[in-house]
Amino acid sequence: MISGFQKFLLRGNLIDLAVGVLIGAAFGKVVDTFTKGVIMPIIGIFGSVPNFDNLKFSVNGSEFLYGQFLTALISFLITATVIYFFVITPFNRLMERFKREEKPAVAEPSNEEKLLAEIRDELRRRP
C-alpha cells in the first residue's frame, strides 16, 4: 500500500503538474501586475479605469454586489486579451517559424517498395 503511494508521488506526471501549477501561479502574478500597472493606466488615459465595485442593489435587506462581479469580469477580459496578444500570438508565430525551418526527413523506402521499384525498372528495360 505504501509502495503504491510512493510510486504515485514519484511519477513524472505528478512532478510536471506541480511545476506547471507553480509556474502558472507565478506567471499569473506577472500578467496581473502588467494588466494593473500598464494596461489599466492606458485605459485610464482615454476615460477612467473601470471600477464598478460600488454598484449594488438591495432586496429585503440583502445586498447584491453585482458591481464587484462586473469589475472582476472586465479585469478578466483585459487579462485574457493581454495574454492572447502578448503571449499566445507571438508563441504561435515562433512555433510556425520553427516548423517551416524543419525539413521533414525523407522516409527510407521499405523492402517491399524497393522490390517493387526493382521490378518496375526491370520491366521498363525489356523491349
Image: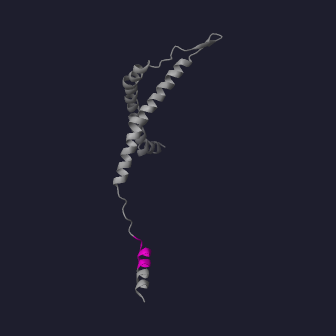
Residue found farthest to the left? 101
Instruction: Indicate the quadrant containing the C terminus: top left, top right, bottom left or bottom right.
Output: bottom left
- Percent x, y of residue 36: 40, 23
Residue 115 occupies which quadrant of the picture? Answer: bottom left
Residue at the image position 46 percent from the left and 42 percent from the top: 5
Range of magenta residues: 109-117
Instruction: Point out residue 13 in the picture as x, y percentages from the top left corner.
Output: 43, 44
> How far across and how far down the image is residue 53, in percent?
50, 16
Magenta region, main secondary structure: helix
- The verdict on residue 113 being magenta is yes
What kind of colouring is applied to the model shown? one colour
Residue found at the far bottom of this picture: 127
Please tell me whether residue 84 is drawn above or below residue 117 in the rendered image. above
Residue 107 to residue 20: above or below: below
Q: Position of residue 24 (x, y in %)?
A: 41, 34
Q: Is residue 56 magenta?
A: no
- Please give the name of the residue rendered at 52% of the width and 13% of the height, measured from the top-left corner: 54
Which residue is drawn at the image coordinates 47% and 25% (left, top)?
75
